[in-house]
């Protein structure tokens, strides 16, 4: 858990607010991921970045905007969210993210618990 | 396409008794399979990983899993449950496009004193 950190751990925001979630990995990995975990639903992959380039956008609404300035940092910018966006947002990283990299172990951060009022 | 199915949404055991959490997979080719554990308000922690090197995989905290191709299963076991094992467990499958994992629905393990 200490290899991937996320801030803040808890966030409460109104539907008109703009906020950002931050993820940082200290493992030297090249791939980073955002997941959404809602109650009673399987984890949903949102975005994948490999070597700072977005390689996966899993039909995520535009009110979620990811940013990956370098291989160690990943942000999720939030604006005009809806109450149904309340969830635990998990960040993960893995080694190569290259073809065949699905064998790579993903290391998860502790998550940000987001509540949208 | 690959899918992963966890057969039980809840499992309840007494402390000191064996744990069995079931996971079946479907894949057109040899998969990578993982078990993760999630304690309340925490991220997912890797327990163990199968990548075809050995069919019996030993993980942390006394857990192990056996890959059975004939049964397309990757069940997680532990000989003796501890109170600290109470958590939610996820079976994940890789082997599709890079970086993408297929998640099982999760199994909540309850351990009674």
Image (cartoon, coloured by chain):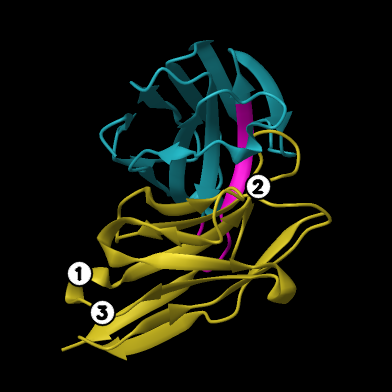
Q: Is residue A46 above or below residue B60?
A: above
Q: CA distance from mark 2 to mark 3?
A: 28 Å
Q: Residues within 10 Å of mark 2 (few under 14, many from 20)?
A: many
Q: Position of residue B76 (x, y in %)?
A: 46, 71
Q: Which residue bears the numbered disc 3?
A: B81
Determine whether, in the image, residue B53 is placed left or right of residue A108.
Answer: right
Q: Quadrant of residue A89?
A: top left
Which residue does the image show at 20% across and 76% down from the upper left? B82
Question: Residue placed farthest to the front in the image?
Answer: B54
Which residue does the image show at 49% across and 38% down from the upper left? A106
Magenta-tinted stretch: A38-48
State the SS at label 2: loop
State the SS at label 1: helix
Q: Disc 1 is attached to a residue of which chain?
A: B
The answer to whether residue A47 is magenta is: yes
Letter of the chain in cyan? A
The answer to whether residue B4 is magenta is: no
Q: Residues within 10 Å of mark 1 (few under 14, many from 20)?
A: few
Q: Which residue bears the numbered disc 2?
A: B94
Letter of the chain in yellow? B
């Amino acid at each position: 858990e200490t290899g991937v950190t996320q801030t803040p751990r808890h966030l409460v925001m109104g539907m008109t607010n703009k906020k950002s979630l931050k993820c940082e990995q200290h493992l030297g990995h090249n791939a980073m991921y955002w997941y959404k975990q809602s109650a009673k639903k399987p984890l949903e992959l949102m975005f994948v970045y490999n070597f700072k380039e977005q390689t996966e956008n899993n039909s995520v609404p535009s009110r979620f905007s990811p940013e990956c300035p370098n291989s160690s940092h990943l942000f999720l910018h939030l604006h005009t969210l809806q109450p149904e966006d309340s969830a635990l947002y998990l960040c993960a990283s893995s080694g190569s993210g290259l073809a065949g990299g699905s064998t790579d172990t993903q290391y998860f951060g502790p998550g940000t618990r987001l509540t949208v009022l | 396409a690959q899918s992963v199915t966890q057969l039980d949404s809840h499992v309840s055991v007494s402390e000191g008794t064996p744990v069995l959490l079931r996971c079946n997979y479907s894949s057109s080719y040899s998969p990578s399979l993982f078990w993760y554990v999630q304690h309340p308000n925490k991220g997912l922690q890797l327990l163990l990983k199968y990548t075809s090197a050995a069919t019996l995989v030993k993980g942390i905290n006394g857990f192990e899993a056996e890959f059975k191709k004939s049964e397309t299963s990757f069940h997680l076991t532990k000989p003796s449950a501890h109170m600290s094992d109470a958590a939610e467990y996820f079976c994940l499958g890789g082997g599709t496009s890079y970086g993408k994992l297929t998640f099982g629905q999760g199994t909540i393990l309850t351990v009674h004193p």
